[in-house]
């Protein structure tokens, strides 16, 4: 017990110094001196601190969490301020024994430098000895003065004539006006804006130094070590801000020589003249051919319409190819990875989710294609029933709320109508599909803000609206979004994914329900879609003679004992049908070839329904169907195909099929045609 008590005291004592040290190392604001010595440190055209040292200290400040207060002045004044503790840090100071007694330096240099002698083209200097009789310019208060005395006294016999300047700008002006003969500057003067054609380097260099951060003596002793740690990390990381800053400031921009600019200017002028001539000539040709153009305008319109149709179809097919291949690649690729035993169970579960998502996307694309083909062939059925609009909108809201939350969007549902007025009579499935597509589109094309759903009654109609704060639609493309095989910008390579058929299908559904969809939009601010349909669908529908099935619930039970033979080469397609029909029909049997149907029915005489795929060689299939009908007139023959239109459907019926269904088979529709056939007998 005593041992545990002592151990507890030991850990408590250890925790107090750590806490104290953490508080001791906390700094909120640091005053940093800034003077003009480009590119190491300077005040840019915006009046802001800039340069290599500034990039480094701002990176450190961001990582350590302290603020920087810049103090602008000249070098000599800032050095005095650092000595008097009026500022905390002065960047770009070279080390000397004298300065070490006045300030605290970090150990790892930001840059290595040396002194270099510059002059004009009039003066020739070959060594340091030649400086003895010349007027030398240097920065006031810099280390250069003491270095010059030390280096040159031993090499020059004459006394030094030193002239101090507050900054490089005034020093260069004095050099150009012959007030001084040479200047002594750091190696980084070469990269500054003050070096021009009149000022040249003598290639005389001396006194290599390290450029450091100088800290006030009154500051915390641990602070320079923090800078060393960050500078070391930056210098060891090729992609750090340190090397980015060196590249920004130390890469010389080569100006195009004048002897190249003149020929370029002449070439540009010639091109302008030629373009002007071509423009004038083309204008005259257009005037001359205007009469011919007017006579052929009808032909041109027809040609443009054909070209536009081909362009849209080509773009649509390209988009559909992408929409089919993308999920297929995901399914095939991740299915192959599932066979690899090296992946963990969690990784395989993730791959299964990706396969499921890709499958759903592919199935959604296929359903869109099937729906649009049914709409084109006028084979889309309407199933009407009474239902609560509030309940339908709540189901829609619940199903899409998570999708909106993933994009950090607000999904709003407005229901202001009393409960007893909720009931309308229409096709619930198609109404849900329309609204589901409108809301999904709103979420897809909205980056921030909200999507609102609501409704109100107007006369005998119900108006359901979907508002968003998304990207909007260009005015000239507003109606194009409802056209089949057309999008607002179908050739945009950066467009959002999707088949582009959603709004076309929704618009067709709205027309089937005797309604319409309108859109109000402002590009860049958002869109408002409004669906208007009658509250009572049946009365309006009968006057149009459109196909309609009016039931409270769709048919799901067979009224006959169905023994089905599925003729399908594709094993996956058969497995899909087998799963769908299991528990609904009496028995399911399978054949891969239609050539064996007669023999099969003799072996299994209770077979009364044959579901046959006609996606292959249709002529062979039709010949086989004619023979089957002669041998067994009691069979109910149903054709299934991925490509269905009125012409193909009529060919199949003429060949002897009793019904034609599109793939994928919809159970409700399949059971309906079987019941209708056997009830008619």
Image: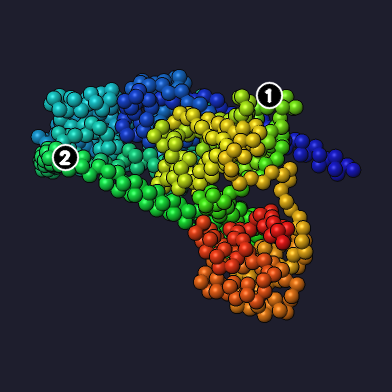
In-front residue for pair 284/114: 284
Residue 620 lies, in percent from the top left, at 53, 74
Answer left or right for 492 relative to 369.
left
Give the quadrant of the C terminus.
Answer: bottom right
Specify few, some or many for label 1: CA neighbours under 10 Å numbering under 14, 14-19, or 20 or more: few
Residue at left 63%, top 58%?
A: 665
Q: Decide: is 437 above or below 85.
A: below
Residue at left 45%, top 28%?
A: 522
Residue 468 in sight here: no
Q: Quadrant of residue 416?
A: top right
Q: Quadrant of residue 663?
A: bottom right
Determine which of the numbered discs, if any, sits on residue 641 in the image.
none
In-front residue for pair 588/534: 534
Which residue is the site of mark 1?
Answer: 416
Q: Secondary structure at mark 2?
A: helix
In-front residue for pair 531/533: 533
Q: Secondary structure at mark 1?
A: loop
Answer left or right for 322 relative to 360.
left
Answer left or right for 138 relative to 447.
left
Q: Earlier in the sequence, mark 2 or mark 1?
A: 2
Give the quadrant of the N terminus.
Answer: top right
Answer left or right for 173 relative to 321.
left
Determine which of the numbered discs, if any, sits on residue 291 in the image.
2
Residue 676 in sight here: yes
Residue at left 75%, top 58%?
A: 558
Residue 599 lies, in percent from the top left, at 67, 80
Q: Quadrant of residue 536?
A: top right
Residue at left 47%, top 26%?
A: 68
In-front residue for pair 151/647: 647
Residue 591 lies, in percent from the top left, at 65, 74
Tell us which disc is closer to us: 2 or 1.
2
């Amino acid at each position: 017990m005593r041992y545990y008590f002592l151990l507890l005291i030991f850990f408590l004592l250890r925790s107090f110094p750590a806490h104290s040290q953490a508080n001791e190392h906390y700094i909120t604001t640091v005053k940093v001196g800034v003077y003009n010595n480009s590119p190491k440190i300077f005040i840019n055209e915006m009046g802001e601190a800039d340069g290599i040292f500034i990039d480094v200290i701002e990176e450190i400040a961001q990582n350590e969490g302290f603020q920087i207060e810049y103090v602008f002045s000249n070098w000599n004044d800032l050095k005095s301020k650092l000595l008097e503790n009026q500022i905390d840090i002065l960047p770009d100071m070279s080390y000397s024994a004298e300065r070490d007694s006045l300030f605290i330096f970090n150990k790892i240099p930001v840059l290595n430098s040396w002194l270099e002698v510059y002059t004009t083209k009039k003066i020739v200097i070959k060594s340091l000895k030649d400086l003895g009789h010349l007027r030398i310019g240097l920065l006031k208060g810099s280390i250069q003065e003491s270095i010059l005395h030390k280096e040159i006294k031993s090499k020059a016999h004459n006394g030094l004539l030193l002239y101090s300047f507050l900054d490089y700008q005034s020093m260069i002006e004095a050099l150009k006006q012959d007030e001084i003969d040479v200047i002594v500057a750091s190696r980084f003067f070469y990269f500054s804006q003050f070096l021009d054609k009149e000022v040249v380097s003598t290639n005389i260099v001396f006194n290599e130094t390290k450029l450091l951060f100088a800290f006030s003596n009154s500051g915390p002793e641990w602070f320079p070590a923090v800078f060393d740690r960050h500078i070391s990390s930056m210098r060891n990381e090729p992609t750090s801000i340190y090397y980015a800053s060196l590249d920004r400031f130390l890469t010389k921009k080569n100006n195009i020589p004048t002897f190249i600019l003149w020929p370029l200017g002449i070439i540009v002028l010639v091109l302008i003249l030629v373009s002007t001539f071509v423009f004038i000539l083309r204008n005259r040709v257009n005037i001359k051919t205007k009469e011919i153009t007017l006579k052929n305008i009808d032909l041109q319109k027809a040609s443009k319409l054909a070209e536009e149709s081909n362009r849209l179809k080509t773009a649509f097919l390209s988009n559909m190819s992408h929409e089919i291949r993308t999920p297929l690649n995901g399914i095939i690729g991740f299915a192959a990875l599932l066979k690899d035993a090296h992946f963990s169970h969690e990784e395989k579960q993730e791959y299964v989710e990706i396969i499921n998502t890709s499958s759903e996307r592919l199935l959604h694309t296929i359903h869109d294609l099937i729906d649009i083909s049914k709409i084109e062939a006028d084979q889309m059925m309407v199933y009407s029933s009474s239902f609560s609009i509030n309940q339908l909108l709540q189901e829609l809201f619940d199903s899409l709320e998570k999708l909106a939350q993933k994009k950090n969007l607000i999904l709003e549902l407005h229901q202001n109508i009393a409960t007893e007025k909720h009931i309308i009579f229409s096709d619930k499935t198609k109404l849900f599909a329309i609204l589901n597509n409108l809301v999904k589109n709103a979420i897809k094309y909205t980056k921030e803000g909200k999507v609102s759903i609501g409704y109100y009654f107007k006369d005998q109609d119900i108006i359901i609206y979907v508002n968003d704060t998304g990207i909007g639609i260009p005015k000239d493309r507003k109606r194009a979004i409802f056209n089949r095989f057309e999008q607002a910008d179908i050739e945009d390579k950066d467009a959002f994914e999707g088949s582009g058929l959603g709004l076309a299908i929704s618009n067709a559904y709205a027309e089937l329900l005797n309604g319409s969809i309108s859109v109000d939009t402002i590009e860049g601010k958002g869109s408002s879609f409004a669906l208007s349909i009658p509250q009572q669908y049946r009365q309006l529908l009968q006057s149009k003679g459109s196909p309609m099935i009016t039931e409270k619930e769709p048919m799901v039970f067979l009224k006959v004992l169905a023994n089905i033979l599925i003729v399908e080469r594709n094993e996956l397609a058969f497995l899909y049908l087998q799963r769908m029909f299991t528990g609904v029909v009496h028995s399911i049997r399978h054949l891969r070839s239609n050539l064996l149907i007669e023999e099969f029915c003799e072996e299994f005489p209770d077979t009364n329904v044959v579901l046959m795929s006609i996606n292959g060689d249709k002529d062979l299939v039709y010949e086989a169907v004619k023979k089957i009908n002669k041998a067994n007139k009691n069979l109910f023959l149903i054709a299934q195909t991925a490509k269905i239109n009125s012409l193909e459907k009529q060919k199949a019926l003429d060949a002897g099929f009793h019904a034609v269904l599109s793939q994928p088979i919809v159970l409700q529709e399949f059971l309906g045609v079987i019941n209708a056939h056997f009830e008619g007998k």
